[in-house]
Amino acid sequence: MRSTYSRLPALRIDLRRGLLCGAAFIESPNHDARPAGARPELIVVHGISLPPGEFGGPWIERLFTNSLPADAHPYFRTIADLRVAPHLLVRRDGSIAQFVSFRDRAWHAGKSRYRGRQACNDFSIGVELEGSDHRAYAGVQYRALAAIVEVLCGAYPGLSPRRVVGHSDIAPGRKTDPGPAFDWRRARRLISQRLARLSAATALRRRFRGAPGRAPARTADPTGGSGI
Ligand SMILES: [Zn+2]
């Protein structure tokens, strides 16, 4: 199920649907409603490769859509039953896919804590980068991430470039991604280079403030809070 991913086009958020225009949408069932009143206030950066250390296959999408064949690789047997998905995935070539609407709670962070607040899935947006802890991420992935952070910050008033963390920051001791190979200085530099554009985004934010409300939470994360 290779998909047609978008390549760093001009990104834009459709607030009504909570979608990143310019990204391929591959719907994942691994989400539910955010708790009443919850809104995006944090961006969580992850790293994933399947099998670990291999890039370019269809397996990440298959995991996020609950169709990973457990017998295709020994490692898959250990994860095939996970029910996980981020909002976005950035492949090695910078192409972007979306699995869950930003309006909804994607099951990506698992048991986690940010500045004393538990359950980061409630109030975060999860961005997976195809990569592994100890191999350099691609330059185009940094550029894609910076573009994503820019449009998200423009669309959601609770977000800011400072509120971008790694999974390992909110689940220390349990998660290591995006790993030491992820160059935070480079990422932050690219993000701050885009800060100038945020003034325009702020105007957009004002224009769209008062987006439709969200339904109350229905179910708990059935992954048992493992995350990805
Ligand atoms: Zn993760």
Image (cartoon, rainbow, N blue to C red):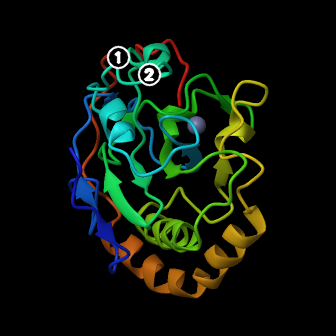
Residue drawn at 56 percent across, 36 percent down:
52
Q: Quadrant of the N terminus?
A: top left
Left or right: where 97 falls relative to 162: left
Inspect this view and state whether residue 82 appears.
yes
Left or right: where 83 falls relative to 184: left
Q: Which quarter of the figure has residue 96? A: bottom left
Q: Please give the count of numbered marks on the rendered protein.
A: 2
Frontmost residue, 73 versus 189 = 73
Q: Which mark is residue 76?
A: 2
Residue at numbered disc 1: 71
Percent x, y for residue 89? 42, 51
**In which of the image's four quarters is ligand 1 placed?**
top right
Evaluate if marks 1 and 2 touch, with contact meaning CB atoms under 8 Å apart.
yes
Frontmost residue, 121 versus 54 = 54
Percent x, y for residue 127? 49, 50
Mark 2 residue type:
Phe
- CA neighbours of label 2 inside 10 A, class few (<14), some (14 to 19), many (20+): some
Frontmost residue, 79 versus 74 = 74
Residue drawn at 36 percent across, 30 percent down:
63
Percent x, y for residue 182? 70, 56
Residue drawn at 35 percent across, 17 percent down:
70
Inspect this view and state whether residue 14 appears.
no
Q: CA distance from mark 1 to mark 2?
A: 7 Å
Camera-nearest label, 1 or 2: 1
Element marked by disc 1: loop
Mark 1 residue type:
Asp
Residue drawn at 61 percent across, 22 percent down:
111
- CA neighbours of label 1 inside 10 A, class few (<14), some (14 to 19), many (20+): few
Where 194 falls versus 103 (above or below)? below
Percent x, y for residue 219? 34, 15
